[in-house]
Image (spheres, helix red, strand yellow):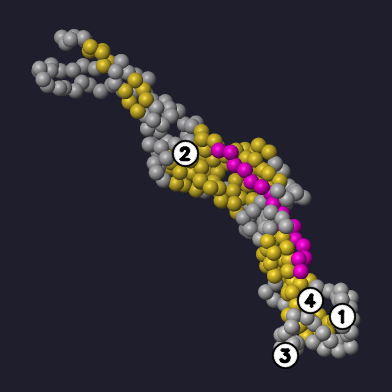
């Protein structure tokens, strides 16, 4: 909007140039970056009448969403297992960030989270990013909070919309999607070792030997299994387990892991061969 519309020039000698008084413009804070505005400038008075079409290009902020940080550790307000995934029953902190790719500073940026679908409840839907200068990035000072429902099947999608809004009401919206994942673990095998001095190192146990059992666990789910403990038991009196539980740790999605620590086993002298042990 033109606040002044008249420019006065001093006398201009032939072949010379001169500047007139400035005119004031009111530019909408909602004008998009690189938008061009054209003006009609008509020269009158003791000059040959002519028309000039000057233009200006507006520099405005342009915000781009950065990858959102997922925090599901056990430090409040989040409450989870710390594997950076969405699992059933967890309270998740989502920490948004943005970069300013435009030509002007973004003022007082607020991030707003909206649910579009999926088994989650949003308990804190705003996060403050503050001012974001040109060509700089900012991460929110406070996180969104998201509560995942319990007993959600592995692979269930969650749809969100994240809106960045500056103090003038400019908005930049991005669709954000996640998947609620669960581990699905099962026994995959048991490796037998019978090294000396308790065995003959042939990979099989016979009467009178002591050996090592290495449990193998398979994770068929999309989520990481964490803090996995494996416990072995037997109903066969000819076999004694010296320790029955080993800590396996984490098993990545769609993978198999073998215990680093064995369950120690001993076999009585009187056991016949061959014999299946349960």
Which numbered mark, 1 or 2, is in the foreground of this view? Answer: 1
Q: CA distance from mark 4 to mark 1?
A: 24 Å
| Residue 50, quarter of the rendered image | top left
Q: How many marks?
A: 4
Q: Nearer the viewer, residue 241 or 5?
A: 241
Indicate left or right for 18 with 69 as reference.
left
Give the distance between the C-alpha atoms of the residues marked 4 and 2, in whole angstroms. Answer: 56 Å
Q: Nearer the viewer, residue 146 or 228?
A: 228
Query: The residue tagged with tag 2: helix, strand or loop?
Result: strand
Q: Is residue 63 placed above or below 222 in the rendered structure?
A: above
Describe residue 46's horizontal placement relative to residue 29 as left or right: left
Residues in magenta, as a range: 174-189
**Residue in view at x 69 percent, y 54 percent:** 222
- Which residue lies under the disc numbered 2? 63
Nearer mark to the viewer, of 4 and 1 = 1
First along the sequence among labels 3 and 4? 3
- Label 3 vs label 4, nearer the camera: 3
Q: Residues within 10 Å of mark 4 (few under 14, many from 20)?
A: some
On the image, numbered disc 3 is attached to which residue? 197
Q: Earlier in the sequence, mark 3 or mark 1?
A: 3
Cα separation, mark 1 vs mark 2, equals 71 Å
Residue at point 41% right, 45% down?
A: 136
SS category of the residue bearing label 4: loop
Across and down, in percent, residue 80 comes to 67, 56
Local packing at callout 2 (Cα closer than 10 Å; few below 14, some 14-19, many 20+) is: many
Q: Separation of disc 3 and disc 4 at Cα?
A: 21 Å
Q: Which residue is mark 1?
A: 274
Q: Earlier in the sequence, mark 1 or mark 2?
A: 2
Badge 3 crowding class, 10 Å Cα cut-off, few under 14, some 14 to 19, many 20 or more, is few
Q: Against 73, is 51 above or below?
A: above
* Residue 230 seen in the figure: no
Mark on residue 244? 4
């Amino acid at each position: 909007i033109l606040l002044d519309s008249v420019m006065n020039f001093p006398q201009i000698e032939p072949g010379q140039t001169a500047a007139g008084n400035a005119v004031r413009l009111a530019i909408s804070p909602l004008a998009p970056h690189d938008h061009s505005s054209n003006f009609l400038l008509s020269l009158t008075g003791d000059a040959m009448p002519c028309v000039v079409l000057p233009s200006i290009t507006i520099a405005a902020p342009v915000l781009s969403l950065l990858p959102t940080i997922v925090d599901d550790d056990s430090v409040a307000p989040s409450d989870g297992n710390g594997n950076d995934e969405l699992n059933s029953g967890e309270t998740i902190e989502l920490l948004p960030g943005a970069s300013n790719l435009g030509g002007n500073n973004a003022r007082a940026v607020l991030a707003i989270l909206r649910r579009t679908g999926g088994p989650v409840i949003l308990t804190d839907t705003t996060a403050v990013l503050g001012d974001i200068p040109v060509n700089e990035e900012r991460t929110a000072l406070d996180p969104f909070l998201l509560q995942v429902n319990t007993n959600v099947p592995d692979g269930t999608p969650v749809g969100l919309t994240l809106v960045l809004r500056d103090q003038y009401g400019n908005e930049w919206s991005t669709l954000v999607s996640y998947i609620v994942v669960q581990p699905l673990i099962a026994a995959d095998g048991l490796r037998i070792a019978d090294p000396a001095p308790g065995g003959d190192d042939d990979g099989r146990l016979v009467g009178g030997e002591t050996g090592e059992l290495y449990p193998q666990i398979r994770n068929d789910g999309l989520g990481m299994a964490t803090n996995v403990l494996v416990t072995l038991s037997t109903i066969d009196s000819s076999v004694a387990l010296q320790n029955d539980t080993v800590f396996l740790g984490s098993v990545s999605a769609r993978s198999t892991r073998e215990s680093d620590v064995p369950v120690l086993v001993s076999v009585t002298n009187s056991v016949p061969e061959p014999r299946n042990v349960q």
